[in-house]
Image (spheres, helix red, strand yellow):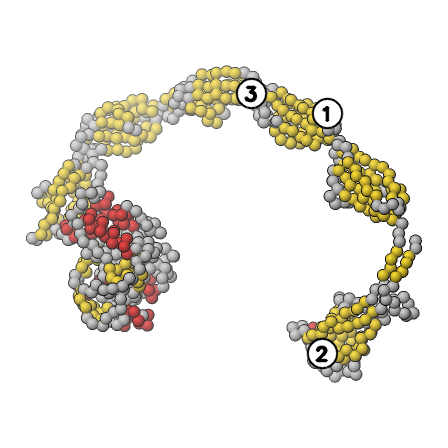
Amino acid sequence: MMKILLFVLFLLSSDWVEAQQLSVQSFQKLENDLSARGSEGRTDQNGDRCAIIKVVTNEKGFVFEPDALGLVGSVDKTSEIWLYVPYGAKRLTIKHPQLGMLRDYVYPERIEKAGVYELILTTGRVETVVHETVNMDYLVIRTDPAEAQVYIDEVYESGTGGVVQKFVPWGKHTYRVEHPLYHTEAGQVEVGSSGKKELAIKLRPAFGSVEINSFPESGAEVYIDGERVGVTPYRGDRLKSGEHRIRVLQPMYQPSEEVVRVRDNETSVVSLELQPNFGVMTFTSDPSCEIWVNNELKGQGSWSGRLNAGSYLLEVRREHHRSFRQTLTVEAGENRTVALGNPVPIYGMLNITSTPGDALIRLNGQEYGRTPALLKDILIGTYTLELSKEGYARESGEITIEEGKVLPVNIEMCSGRELTLQTDREGDILYVDGKRVGVSPQKLELSYGIHTIRAERGEQHTEKQLEVTETGGETVVTLGFGLLSQIHWSSSVTPKQKEILSRLVENMVQVEGGRFQMGGTPEQGSDANDWEKPVHEVTLSDYYMGKYEVRQSEWEAVMGNNPSYFKGDDLPVEQVSWEDCHEFIGRLNALTGLSFKLPTEAQWEYAARGGNLSKGYKFSGSNDLEEVGWYGSNSGNYTHRVGEKQPNELGLYDMSGNVWEWCEDKYGEYNITSQSDPLGAAKGSQWVYRGGCWCFEASYCRVSFRAHDPGNRYYSVGLRLVL
């Protein structure tokens, strides 16, 4: 082989070497490196800690010549050489037999005791380029399919994308191309001076395809040589040529198999007949009965379907009956209808009497005559027994009839219903249909029909009509001398509305008017804000205030909807705007004939402080908010049922916390002058709400704290009523 050497640069020396040069790429102090202070550090002849210069290089064989202070030592590390130099060193000379010399390199930084420095060393290299001529070239083989395996001179060669290329000497070479599903191709090829040699080898398929069908039904599982491959109809496109065992399986049929020969590039079609292993059976019984086969429910009254050949236990079942049972053998291929026997009823007896007699008897809604009666042949089981007679309450209950036993039942029927008459104070005299029955509260039984009930308290009296029915109704009837007696129900009010709104009216607490100091009074301490001042004197007339915040059940009874985020009948309603509250109050007044309102800001604060009974608390009813209110630290981030905490001095609940409560007033600054029954600011676009809520901190729940808003809906704001 002839070589032609072309030299770009040539360095003359005793040996043929490449010209080299050394230089420093960078030098810096490693401030966070403590190597010189640790176990790898060294001391100089004066006992001082040496500095370490870490020379970064991949070359070996360097000679380092320090200045007059000398060199304590050096250590070879991976990709580094550590030089231990005394502090105060100035310069360094670096020599290498091939790379040359860097003379008197001056350190750009002061070398300190136990300091660590990094010197990155680079080499500039001039290389010799050799051009040579060779007696070799490329052999390129392209295969179809691309996954075929290629052997050149009996050595496996890997390729990419169906292309194998190898640099080979001139001359003759053998090749072989293989693939499991194709016929092997082999031969000899010569590579010479004419350039690279390319071969395209397309292998002939050594596989065919198969189509497998089953009849009389498709959907059978297909196995080829024991491996499941799909269901019929099935087509396999790349099955190795030769013999294969085909097997199909279908529930309720015998397995069917066949050996098929697959030929190159041909499709073999196989149709396998399935021999039934079942009979088609039809079972009939009474339409009210269930048909069970081997303890599996098949149908009601009748069933038709396939059963595998074999023996079966048939049952006909019906509640409160003894099941009919029969064994049956099914043969493959048969088609048969079998009429099954009926279950046998299981009876007991019922001996029923009533006081008074002649009451109509019903069992599960079916009539069985009138009392007294001995009812025979009653199927066992649990029944709802009901007795009814005009003028008496309907009586009902559950009874259980047992096999062969007589169940005695005696029922005393009521001609009326027990209830309690009461007023809002004990000791008021009560009358029913003009006859005195006692004092409030009084429990008594009233016959079915309409009665006039009356209560007297000194010179005062109140009365109303009460209808007592068999189907239920009020169990406690309250006659009111106060607000309840003032209600004038709308003709459209429903019994449910009447019940809920009567409770709302009953829960109005009378607040005796008086004089108080309104605003950030001394017990409010440093929490009091500027907008709670100046403290000023307010005089209020008597009024009623709701014991509780308006509940969701009360809002829904009036409005027919529940806008609240947190749902619950006894939770305070929220997500109501100031306008929503006035719509609610308008409808409530139309239903009751009363004049509910939102409280003025002064009415709200006076009641929250406890009115004339005030003990001067910071919150409504206590200086400890945990006792009286739900707020950010104890609510769990949701509202709570009204009335769960302690009330204040007037018996009002949740005036601190749970939900904010809208007031009637527009927001404005306080005036220091005394006022009587103030109505708030004359102008403004913000409405006041008071009391704090479940998601605010304690300081917002104080009795003097004021908040205001354009009247929007929030899931922390509700309302309380006054009259």
Q: Residue 532's quadrant in the figure?
A: bottom left
Report the amino acid beneath label 1: Arg
Left or right of 430 in this view: 64? right
Report the amino acid beneath label 2: Pro
- Is residue 503 visible to us here? no
Q: Position of residue 302 (x, y in %)?
A: 44, 21
Q: Which residue is mark 1?
A: 261
Q: Residues within 10 Å of mark 1 (few under 14, many from 20)?
A: some
Which of the two discs, 1 and 2, sits closer to the camera? 2
Question: Mark 3 falls on what kind of element?
Answer: strand
Question: Mark 2 falls on what kind of element?
Answer: loop
Q: Nearer the viewer, residue 635 or 365?
A: 635
- Vertical placement of residue 447 versus 7, above or below: above
Give the quadrant of the C terminus.
bottom left
Q: Earlier in the sequence, mark 3 or mark 1?
A: 1
Question: Mark 1 falls on what kind of element?
Answer: strand
- Vertical placement of residue 97 versus 644, above or below: below
- Vertical placement of residue 196 versus 43, above or below: above
Q: Position of residue 691 (x, y in %)?
A: 29, 62
**Marks 1 and 2, how far apart in space?**
87 Å
Which of the two discs, 3 and 2, sits closer to the camera? 2
Report the amino acid beneath label 3: Phe
Left or right of 500 in this view: 694? right
